[in-house]
Image (cartoon, rainbow, N blue to C red):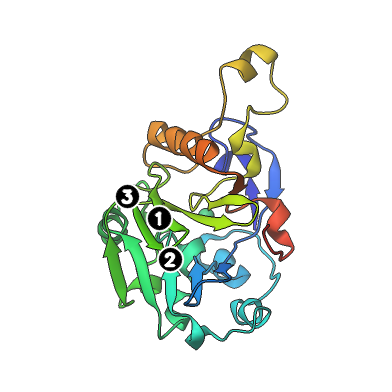
């Protein structure tokens, strides 16, 4: 998708265009087939939100690249239910969908300020398992509440051989995890991280970026351009 960079970085880089991917993550090595989010295809970005977008890879092709079909997915962890993270979840007919209670409540009755980011037909009728707060769902796979971007956003920490990798869930770039570029040293000093540009609560969003930065050995920011090319982490 082509976005204004400030959509991801609150109060920085207005007017700068950036191309970002919508990503689905497959956790390899667990007993079950687990996805984190299911992304959204270019057609939906254009049709639902009028965002310029082009297709990189279909959801089905992405799954096939790790030897799976949608019906093989046992669990989808929904970091949150905004359209760009959940558009293909309904294709995983046999999956339980883990979602935070606060997110499910908000998604069904969002405040108008964020309502255009939720498309109810994408998540209505899914086989939800509601979680509340922190939970370790399997050895080394943790759900960590990181509100702000949305009220029930969660990040997913996965222990890997190179340390703890954390999928942010909230919409951001790698650049959110450090001081902004092209500003004075004075501003850099007082801006350790940058809140997600889209948020219900910017202060909570800022704290969640800090929390992930502190927890993670490897930060996986959901819309970072580096993930435009499919890859394995670590
Ligand atoms: Zn997003």
Sequence-wise, the earlier of marks 1 and 3 is: 3
Quadrant of the rendered image containing residue 89? bottom left
| Residue at 30% from the left image edge and 51% from the top image edge | 133
Residue 131 image label: none
Where residue 198 appears, as percent x and y from the top left, is 47, 43
Report how far apart the C-alphas of labels 1 and 3 lie in the structure.
Answer: 27 Å
Name the residue that disc number 1 marks: 143
Residue 140 in sight here: yes
Label 1 close to label 2 by CB (< 8 Å): yes
Judged from the image, the secondary structure of the residue bearing numbered disc 3 is: loop
* Left or right, 105 with reference to 95: left
Q: Quick one: 7 or 232, which is closer to the camera?
A: 232
Name the residue that disc number 2 marks: 77
- Image mark count: 3
Report how far apart the C-alphas of labels 2 and 3 lie in the structure.
Answer: 25 Å
Q: Is residue 44 above or below residue 222?
A: below
Residue 112 image label: 3
| Dot 1 crowding, Cα within 10 Å, few <14, some 14–19, many 20+ | many
Q: Is residue 40 above or below residue 174?
A: below
Where residue 78 appears, as percent x and y from the top left, is 42, 63
Judged from the image, the secondary structure of the residue bearing numbered disc 2 is: strand
| Residue at 46% from the left image edge and 33% from the top image edge | 206
Where residue 91 appears, as percent x and y from the top left, is 47, 82
Label 2 close to label 3 by CB (< 8 Å): no
Q: Point out the image quarter for the N terminus.
A: bottom right
Q: Point out the image quarter for the C terminus.
A: bottom right
| Residue at 40% from the left image edge and 85% from the top image edge | 94
Which of pointers 1 and 3 indicates the residue nearer the eye? 1
């Amino acid at each position: 998708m082509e976005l204004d960079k400030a959509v991801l970085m609150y109060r920085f880089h207005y007017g700068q265009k950036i191309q970002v991917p919508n990503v689905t993550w497959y956790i390899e090595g667990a007993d079950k087939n687990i996805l984190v989010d299911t992304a959204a295809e270019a057609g939906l970005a254009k049709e639902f939100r009028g965002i310029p977008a082009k297709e990189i890879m279909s959801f089905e092709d992405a799954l096939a690249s790790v030897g799976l079909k949608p019906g093989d997915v046992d669990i989808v962890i929904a970091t949150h239910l905004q359209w760009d993270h959940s558009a293909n979840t309904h294709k995983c007919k046999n999956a339980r969908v883990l979602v935070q209670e606060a997110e499910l409540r908000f998604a069904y009755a969002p405040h108008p300020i964020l309502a255009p980011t939720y498309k109810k037909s994408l998540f209505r009728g899914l086989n939800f398992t509601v979680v509340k707060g922190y939970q370790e769902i399997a050895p080394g796979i943790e759900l960590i509440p990181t509100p702000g971007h949305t009220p029930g956003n969660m990040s997913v920490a996965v222990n890997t051989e190179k340390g703890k990798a954390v999928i942010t869930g909230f919409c951001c770039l790698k650049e959110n995890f450090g001081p902004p570029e092209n500003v004075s040293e004075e501003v850099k000093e007082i801006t350790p991280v940058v809140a997600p540009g889209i948020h219900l609560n910017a202060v909570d969003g800022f704290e969640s970026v800090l929390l992930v930065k502190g927890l993670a050995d490897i930060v996986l920011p959901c819309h970072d351009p580096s993930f435009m090319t499919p890859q394995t982490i670590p």
